[in-house]
Every structure is written in structure tokens, then in C-alpha cells.
Image (tube, rainbow, N blue to C red):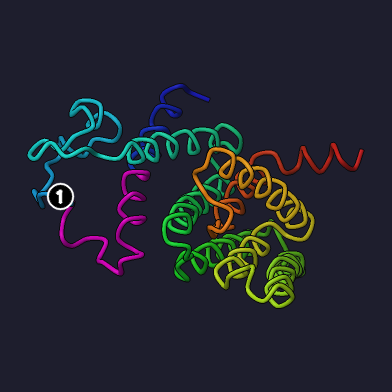
Amino acid sequence: MHPLILVYTFILGTLIGSFLNVVVYRVPREESLSFPPSHCPSCNTRLKAFDLVPVVSYLFLGGKCRTCKTGISIRYPFVEAFTGVLFLVTVMKFGISLEALKYLIVISLLLPVALIDYDHTIIPDRLNVGIFLTALSFLLLEVYLGNAAFRDLLNPFYGMVLGGGFFLFIAVVTKGAMGGGDIKLLAALGFLFGTADTLLLMFLSFIIGGALSSLLLLLKIKKRKDYIPFGPFICVSAFIVIFWGNQILNWYLS
């Protein structure tokens, strides 16, 4: 693949990441994504174009607001750079294809899901619906193009029932250990991945969830009585399934 395509892909990813920072901040507060324009939350100064260049502006400004000098969270450039890397890896793996486009959209929805759930312990329905509609739209497009048949809808449907149903079962048995957002997220991802990858997704979610929860407790970032949202673990597992799911399943089955 031409290096310029990879460079443009990374830049596009950082730009999308900059927008995702807005989504993460405003959606839980039920604020408009377009109004008011980007501004410093401390002094309300409207940010200019050179304040909004992904990663570069943060480094140039020394991580502070140009006007009031209030510190800017390191999360902003991290999300921008991380989104750029995810976009780059996606295009390198899937090439310039419908599959790559599908996963770029899904990744752009999973990142705010993880961050909003970590910050506010909620997963907005519109993000879960967005993942489901993305999976459904691309599947119907494949049917229209002749690359899939209507019977191929069965596997995503079984994946949706498996993921959402299992987490619903856990929520009922444990009386709320899994939230409604987690159930809807697994259902949407189950439709995206199908049955085999959904099983892998659930397995990885519990393994990663246990490991990272223990780490958060050891580092005293969280206390034993604190609620640790499960959504971020599902999202991390989904990234692994997207990029390495087939290899993991083939390794296990062989």
C-alpha cells in the first residue's frame, strides 16, 4: 500500500479522534455536538483553528489553554493519536474495502462508548444503536452486491441473541451486575461478529475485565467498593476480535 495512503489514513484518524473527544464530553451532558463551537471549558474562549490541530496543538501550547493557561487533559491528544493508530491498523489489515470502512465506523463508536462508560458508568443508546445499524447496513449492502445471501442474516442474529441474552441472564442472576448498556452493547456487537466471534468476545471481556480490574485495585486507582464499568473491557475485547479474532480462533481450533 502506498505510504501516502497510510499517512492520510492516520491524519484522518486523528481528526476523527478530535471529534470523538467532543462526543465523549458533550453526549453524557446532553449537549449539542455542533453548538456552541469548541471552547475552553475554563475561560469559555472560543478556540481558533490553530488550537484544534490534533496532537500538534497540544504539544505547541504545552498542554495549556492559550488564553487562561489552564491545563488540558493529556487524554485529548491520546485519544486523537490512538484513533489515528487504530485507523492506520484497520486499513493496513483490510485494505481499501467495505470491510475496512465498516470497522472504521464501528471503532469510531466503540471509543466513545469505552470513555463515556468509564467516566459516567453509562453507555448512551444512540452509540449502541449506531453499532447495530452499521453492522446491519453493511450486511444488507453485501446482500445487494451479491457477496452474501439473506440466509447469512442468521449468524449475526444468533450472535446478537447469544451476546445480549447471556449478559441479560447475568444481569438477572446477579441482580444488576451487568447494566442495560452492557447488554445492548453485547447484542449489537453480537450482530456485528456472529456466533463464533461473539463467544470469543465474551471470553476475552471477562479475562481482560478481571486482569485490568485487579490492576486498577493494585494501583489504587479504584477501591474494592468502587463500581468498575464493564463497557471498556468489552470495547478492548472488540478491538482484539476485529484485528486478531480469526487468528485466535484458528489457533484454538487447531
Near-viewer residue (223 or 184):
223
Residue 160 among those drawn in magenta: no
Which quadrant of the view contains residue 120?
Answer: bottom left
Where in the figure is residue 140, as x and y percent of width and height?
A: 61, 66
Which quadrant of the view contains residue 234?
Answer: bottom right
Report whether 149 appears left or right of 118. right
Identify the residue shown where x is 51% and y is 53%. Answer: 110
Identify the residue shown where x is 63% and y is 59%. Answer: 142
Q: Which residue is mark 1?
A: 42
Identify whether 129 is placed above or below 36: below
Name the residue type under label 1.
Ser
Residue 20 among those drawn in magenta: yes
The kind of secondary structure element at disc 1 is: loop
Where in the figure is residue 56, as x and y percent of width and height?
A: 26, 28
Identify whether 61 is placed above or below 141: above
Near-viewer residue (181 or 156):
181
Report whether 245 appears left or right of 119. right
Q: Which quarter shows the C terminus?
A: top right
Where in the figure is residue 154, as x and y percent of width and height?
A: 76, 69
Please provide the residue range marked out in magenta.
16-40
Identify whether 187 is placed above or below 40: below
Identify the residue shown where x is 23% and y is 35%. Answer: 53
Identify the residue shown where x is 25% and y is 26%. Answer: 59
Report whether 155 appears left or right of 71. right
- The answer, for residue 185, to whether it is visible in the render is yes
Identify whether 153 is placed above or below 84: below
- The answer, for residue 150, to whether it is visible in the render is no
